[in-house]
Image (cartoon, rainbow, N blue to C red):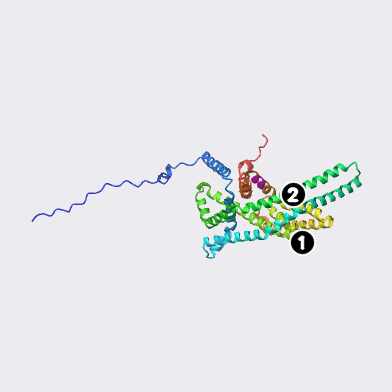
Amino acid sequence: MKPQTPPTLPPREPPSAPARLPPTLGLRPARMRNATRGQRIALAVGLGLAVLFLLWLFSAILTPFVLAACIAYFLDPVATRLHRLGMPRGLASLLLVAGLMALALLALLLLYPLVISQVGTLLARLPSYIAGVGAAVQEAVAALEQRFGPEVFDTRLRDLAVSQVGAILSFLGTAATRLIGGGYALFSVFTLVVVTPVVAFYLLRDWTGMMLRIERLLPRRYAATLRQLARDTDRVLSAWLRGQLLCCAMLAVYYAIGLSAVGLELGLMVGLTSGLLSFIPYVGSMTGLATALLLAVGQFGTWNGVALVAAVFVTGQIVEGYIIYPRLLGDRVELHAVWVIFALFAGGVAFGFLGVLLAVPMAAAIGVLARYWIRRYLESPLYLDPPRTGE
């Protein structure tokens, strides 16, 4: 009987090489280098310069995209609330954007013919307005001349005042015509009519996901601080933007109805323009008041009509300052009016209408950063270092 040979085992395969990991994941924590202060500063400065360069390079085509981002930011709380109630985010975004566009189209269809008719009235009545204002100025200068004597107010000064008032009214009429025509051209451009709603829908639908992706890209060392700064900026910006838009809408409706009720022929156009320009603090009300008073002098020829127009604006300022502004904005807004005015004009000079859209968000972000660094300074040895005592 032959002895049984043990079964032969299959030859062992050589051990496979370990899978290669990406360089970042394959480093052990002990071998990872910390970023230096110079690298952090270079990253921040590089990102800032890159953003400014891209804004300058693509400023001609960025307006519909920035406008769409503003719409998505404005509608995001409503879309989030509808999503929490069970509606799909995409459907909620579609309904909100479509509803907003429908309201804008309805307002355009209803108001634009009225505004165009008012522009026609302005062009037709402009000579009579100039004559009426000139007569009122002549009467006022004659009364001053009679009171103070011809050595203070002579004939040449009277003629100069009348001619300057006429030039101002002619300029205002031409500017209003160009503004209405420019606004019509602006809203009839393909990019603003078609591209903006489409981009706004996609941004609103993916808003939460985009914010999460941006948060993941934050440097881990400063992630908590940057998140807090972003929350503060969102709080300030959302309070100011939503409150100011509602305030402008209410003032536009009030001024249009009030000026039309007192009999001003161009009350609708002046009221709507004054309300919309109230987005810039004090500029809209002051511009509307000056324009309405000049038109009232040219139309009525008596001081009773002028007083009624002035009363409309004074009442509007009282309602805005003591009722609308405290209830809609209150103490949540930390943007000073002078800072907002400077930001809007600076953005307009730098990038035109695109700069105006970006001005308030940039002003809110810079204000939050300034308050953060002021707090850091007040807690630092630079501020707390006690003064030297005499030796």
User: What residue lies at 51% left-to-right and 63% top-to-bottom?
Assistant: 88
Q: Residue 92 at what x, y percent from top left? A: 55, 62
What residue sits right under mark 2 in the picture?
172
Left or right of 250, for residue 2: left
| Within-10-Å neighbours for mark 2: few <14, some 14–19, many 20+ | some
Residue positioned most to the top = 391
Q: Which three-letter amino acid code belongs to the residue tagged 1?
A: Ala
Q: Quadrant of the C terminus?
A: top right
Image: magenta residue range:
343-348
Residue 60 image offset from top left, x and y in percent? 59, 46
Q: Secondary structure at mark 1?
A: helix
* Mark identifier at residue 261: 1
Please tell me in which quadrant of the rendered image residue 120 appears.
bottom right
* Residue sitting at the far front: 124
Label 2 vs label 1: CA separation?
Answer: 23 Å
Compared with 34, 214 (above or below) is below
